[in-house]
């Protein structure tokens, strides 16, 4: 097996050699994943806007690898929008059955993989709380990531510790990079190597590896160029951590918020939830866990109709505090924002998170730079 014959780096850690997979080999890999379990993929054939979809056997031959991250996040596949977590009355010794599924997600970008890592820290790896439902879903998950070949104007992963590609140790089973007539494959786990058997994967040549490095450098340079206007001397985490009162930036940029919750729904790193009981009939009740949004007034409403975040401006500020202060404080300095830019693309109030964070350094609205329109989510053609 290639895994057992892995190369050794200077630290003594095993490192798989890079592999080359042809386009026909990719179809074979997709067929194996389809037979292995439930397959979802990010399909690049939807009019230039990659969409998350359930794979079908018939569509494998026509599948197009996405050049950009998907329009939707993949969090619904690891945290369902609604799930049953308890039922009563009944046998209290009987747990809710958790049916583990073998589920593969193919073609996600680094920003979505980083989102799953955000959930892992909260629901799986935090010793103070482990969500058994999440853990079981995560056990059966097989992840294939793909390097971004382009970037949306709204993408800003480079400003939040991210990048348009995945590195070893990021948590994928397989990572693919589009190269001439095929793909360079980086194997992340023994399970990934096992699925590659029979696909015709072979050791990659130096020229193929050089092609991957060239693509990564190109997209990284594009991100640095388009986000130069939003770069700050201090990190976004440092800027938000220093805020003590409601700053002018939050008041200015948050003034157009319409409380729709789109930003949190499309965010790959938002995990706010609510729990309520529902009448299931026949004298039985079930307890449901559903997605919620900290941008909605009802999220922080308490008994007696008291609400510590009654104003939209307070909820707007809370979202930034959670992503760039509370979460990094608890989880080793990592923000719960992956820089995917979906909040920018979908905001009905045309709020750009990058401009909001940049302007934390500005004391008055008059000194703030105008924000570019976030509604130009199409990358330049041919670039």
Image (cartoon, rainbow, N blue to C red):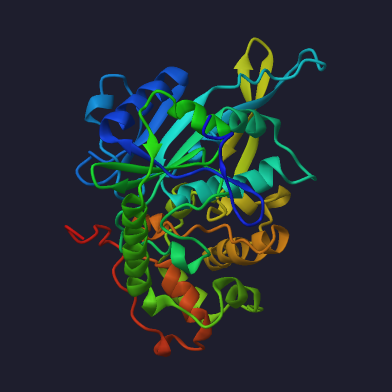
Q: Position of residue 189 (x, y in %)?
A: 56, 37
Picture quadrant of residue 154 = bottom left
Q: Residue at x 64, y 9 (%)?
A: 282
Nearest the camera: 336 or 187? 187
Determine the residue located farthest toward the right in the rendered image. 93
Q: Residue at x 45, y 54 (%)?
A: 263
Determine the residue located farthest toward the left in the rendered image. 382
In the image, taking residue 128 as reference, residue 235 lies left or right, namely left
Nearest the camera: 90 or 230? 230
Nearest the camera: 51 or 223? 223
* 33 lies above or below 347: above
In the image, taking residue 96 as reference, residue 220 lies left or right, namely left
Determine the residue located farthest toward the top in the rendered image. 282
* 316 lies above or below 37: below
Picture quadrant of residue 20 = top left
Q: Residue at x 53, y 64 (%)?
A: 161
Q: Position of residue 305 (x, y in %)?
A: 67, 52
Camera sees residue 262: yes
Q: Position of residue 153 (x, y in %)?
A: 31, 64
Camera sees residue 271: no
* 362 lies above or below 317: below
Q: Position of residue 114 (x, y in %)?
A: 53, 51
Nearest the camera: 341 or 111? 111
Quarter holding the C terminus is bottom left
* 62 lies above or below 148: above
Q: How many marks?
A: 0
Q: Residue at x 43, y 51 (%)?
A: 262
């Amino acid at each position: 097996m290639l895994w057992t014959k892995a190369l050794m780096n200077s630290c003594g850690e095993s490192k798989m050699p890079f592999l080359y997979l042809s386009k026909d080999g990719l179809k074979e890999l997709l067929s194996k994943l389809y037979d292995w379990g439930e397959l979802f993929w990010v399909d690049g054939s939807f009019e230039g806007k990659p969409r998350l979809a359930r794979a079908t056997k018939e569509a494998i031959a026509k599948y197009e690898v996405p050049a950009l991250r998907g329009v939707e996040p993949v969090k619904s596949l690891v945290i369902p929008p609604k799930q049953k977590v308890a039922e009563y009355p009944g046998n209290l010794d009987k747990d809710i059955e958790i049916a583990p599924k073998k589920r593969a997600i193919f073609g996600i970008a680094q920003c979505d993989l980083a989102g799953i890592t955000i959930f892992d820290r909260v629901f799986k790896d935090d010793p103070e709380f482990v969500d058994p439902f999440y853990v079981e879903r995560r056990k059966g998950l097989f992840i294939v990531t793909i390097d971004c070949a382009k970037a949306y104007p709204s993408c800003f992963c480079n400003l939040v510790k991210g990048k348009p590609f995945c590195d070893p140790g990021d948590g994928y089973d397989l990572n693919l990079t589009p190269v001439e007539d095929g793909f360079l494959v980086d194997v992340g786990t023994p399970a990934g190597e096992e699925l590659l058997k029979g696909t015709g994967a072979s050791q990659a040549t130096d020229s193929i590896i050089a092609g991957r490095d060239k693509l990564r450098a190109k997209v990284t340079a594009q991100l640095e160029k388009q986000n130069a206007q939003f770069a700050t001397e201090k990190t976004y985490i440092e800027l938000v951590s220093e805020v003590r009162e409601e700053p002018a930036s939050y008041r200015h940029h948050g003034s157009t918020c319409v409380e729709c919750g789109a930003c949190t729904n499309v965010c790959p790193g938002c995990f706010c939830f609510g729990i309520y009981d529902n009448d299931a009939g026949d004298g039985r009740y079930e307890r449901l866990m559903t997605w919620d949004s900290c941008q909605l007034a009802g999220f922080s409403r308490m008994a007696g109709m008291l609400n510590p975040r009654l104003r939209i401006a307070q909820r707007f500020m809370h979202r930034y505090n959670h992503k760039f202060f509370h979460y990094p404080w608890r989880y080793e300095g990592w923000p719960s924002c992956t820089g995917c830019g979906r909040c920018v693309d979908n905001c009905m109030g045309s709020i750009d998170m990058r401009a909001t964070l940049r302007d934390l350094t500005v004391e008055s609205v008059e000194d703030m730079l105008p924000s570019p329109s976030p509604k130009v989510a199409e990358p330049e053609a041919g670039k």
